[in-house]
Image: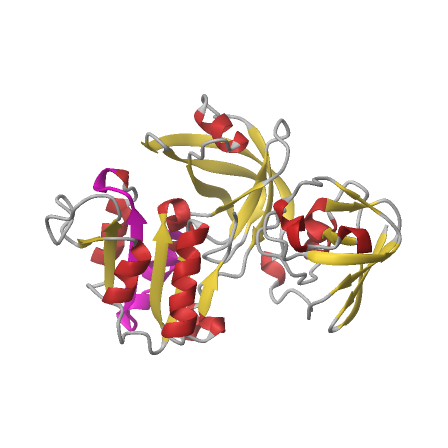
Amino acid sequence: MKITIDSNSGAFEFECAPSEAILRAGLAQGLALPYECATGTCGTCRGRVTAGGVHVDWNEAPGYAKLKREKGDILMCQARPTSDCTLRVPAKIGRHANSETLPAQRTAGIKNVRRLLQDVIDFDLALSSPMTFEAGQFVVLENPAIAGGRAYSMVNFERATSRLRIVVKQQSGGRFSEWLFGGDPTGTELGVFGPLGAATFQPEEGKDMLCVAGGSGIAGMMAILNRAVREGYFNERSGRVFFGVRTLGDAFYMEELAGFVAASADRLQVTLALSHEPVARATHPHLPSIRLAGGMVSDVMVRAMAGSYPNTVAFTAGPPVMVDAVLRHLLHEAKLPRALVRYDKFA
């Protein structure tokens, strides 16, 4: 079926099967439609149906809260066409800049499940076809037995890879999370759509790096650091990483982060912020290159980064409250340009 998008930058057309979400079909065909989560939670991919009809898969999606359903507003990530249709999308859109990283639908089998903590696991996804992605991007995972998709950033970074590494923190009441932690998911085949996201690291920008993460939000930062260290980025630039957890026992990927510090000739600093535990020493008891600080990670970052923002690109991910606090400071107090403050909100 033909989808026509009437946008602030002109009209665009693409084909969409009745079984496809309009957002996914457009993205896969190279149209840079607006979105953030691609799972129905954020409301960014809104459009208004002005001709034709659609079927909405998830009527209770949180992203519908600010939309005017009675006027034909939909979330493109939750809508499938029932006929040729026209959508008014109130945004400037264009074509995807890199054909190598166009999102596509794949399948993948879960392998190498590792329990990092009681409530944190990571695992590999063996993809049905290779994927090229930018460091900092994410994919949407779907289990056919559970309604809806869940967005997760890649921990690893490779070009044309057949393996993705994913980290998941257990969420109370989350059906996908409860399924993962309720038994051994090894061998289960999932749907994978991606790569997605704009919170990406571009080495050619040549700026100092700031990463602020809470909990499993460290995932995309690991991919960014992986690429930066591999390409010798810290030979010329500096980096600061602030990773927030409740207690020292809640920290993970510590050895990997210490390895990044060692490989950067000390031009990369990593600080672990402990929000619910007194900090009795300046460094990690087993990994002295990892610094320790007490307090919420956003507050720790503000104190440590005072006056250190010029020529910096910033990345943040984690719980929405934390991300919002970091964004407020970076944009309104540190006065970083919006283009240099990068994040993706999944929740």
| The quadrant where residue 49 appears | bottom right
Left or right placement of residue 117 versus residue 267 in this view: right
Residue 30: x, y in percent?
Answer: 69, 60
Q: Quadrant of residue 323?
A: bottom left
Q: Give percent across and percent down for residue 68.
A: 74, 55
Q: Is residue 102 left or right of residue 21?
A: left
Residue 15, visible in the rendered structure? no
Q: Nearer the viewer, residue 68 or 218?
A: 68
Q: Position of residue 144 (x, y in %)?
A: 64, 30
Considering every residue shown, the one lying at the far top of the view is: 183
Report the residue at 70% width, 40% height from top.
Answer: 58
- Residue 9, can we see it? yes
| Residue 310 drawn above or below residue 55 | below
| Residue at horizontal 64 percent and vertical 64 percent from the top | 96
Total marks drawn?
Answer: 0
- Write the start and end of the magenta stretch as one range: 222-249
Locate residue 33: give its quadrant: bottom right
Q: Residue at x 46, y 48 (%)?
A: 154
In the image, residue 277 lies at what x, y percent? 20, 43
Residue drawn at (44%, 27%) of the image: 181
In this view, the residue farthest toward the bottom is 310
Colouring style: secondary structure
Q: Is residue 248 located in the magenta-colored stretch of the structure?
A: yes
Q: Is residue 91 left or right of residue 301?
A: right
Seen in the picture, residue 54 relative to 148 is either above or below; the reply is below
Is residue 118 a member of the stretch shown in magenta? Answer: no
